[in-house]
Amino acid sequence: MSKVTCIIVDDEPLAQEVISDYIGRIDFLDEIGVFNDALEAIDFLNTQEVDVIFLDIQMPMLDGINLLKAISSPPKVIFTTAHRHYAVDGFELNAIDYLVKPIPFYRFVQAVEKIKKSQVGKVQKQPSEPEAAFFKVDNKKIKVNYSDIVYIESLKDYIKIILKDRSFVTYQTLSGILAILPPAQFVQIHKSYIVNFHYVKAIEGNTLEIKEHSIPIGRSYRDHALKQIYGTGEKGWR
């Protein structure tokens, strides 16, 4: 698979560090530059081929939106900013995605997957993960889309699967179900619970709010769970 070259343009050192760390976790991304302001980035773009910019919007001297307007043939862009109200302007410039700081790792992954799909002929598409599984309930097997699962609760030799609109109990262990769930969606947060972190609404102390439910976070699971849900672990929740 060909590498996708990218640069970071952001005047916040912490944001640069987080995005650079995320890039380092993605095999097909190749970071080739980090810039504190838009003018430095423009000089670089005039001499180097870049596939993608991770671009902050609010910066001194020249903001991210005007940087793109100043370049005749800009690379693809993923905006990164703390201000949601810039989203409309960003998408009017055909941005790949718009990430609001602090950026959860799963959202970063979603954004760069769009890059992969857009790199026709350059980045080969990887086989997709299964999107559903069959579970035995009473005397029949029912098909369940992973995206419909909100969370899963252990009941010893059984598990209770809570969907968006219903729930059911099936014969399975929590470790067994965790092995088949896509890691880009699910994480174990307690010895008795696995959650689909796309449905997480908030975390307060050692309690996670998901849809209308409150679920405890186990001490031994906390660091790993937050890294999966948020991307930066405990640091991101300060």
Image: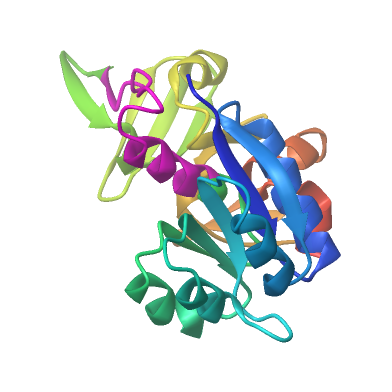
Q: Is residue 100 visible?
A: no
Say if residue 204 shows up in the picture. Answer: yes
Q: Residue at x 25, y 18 (%)?
A: 134
Q: Quadrant of the C terminus?
A: bottom right
* Residue 203 spot, x, y in % from top left: 66, 60
Name the residue at 60% across, 58% down.
Answer: 46
What's the coloring here? rainbow
Q: Nearer the viewer, residue 123 or 13?
A: 123
> As displayed, is residue 220 above or below residue 70?
above
Q: Which residue is rendered at x = 52% and y = 21% of the image?
A: 178
Residue at the front extreme of this rendering: 47
- Residue 185: where, in percent of width, then height? 48, 37
Q: Residue furthest left?
A: 140
Q: Is residue 111 magenta?
A: yes
Residue 73 rendering spot, x and y as whole percentages: 42, 61
Q: In this orientation, which residue lies closer to the viewer: 154 or 185?
A: 185
Position of residue 147 relative to residue 14, above or below, is above
Magenta includes 117? yes
38 left or right, relative to 129: right
Q: Position of residue 137 (x, y in %)?
A: 24, 20
Q: Residue at x 62, y 81 (%)?
A: 63
Q: How many marks?
A: 0
Magenta stretch: give its range. Answer: 109-134
Question: Relative to 85, is 138 above or below?
Answer: above
Q: Compared to 161, does 38 lie above or below?
A: below
Q: Residue 126 versus residue 167: which sits nearer the camera?
A: 126
Q: Which of these two is toward me, 13 or 3?
A: 3
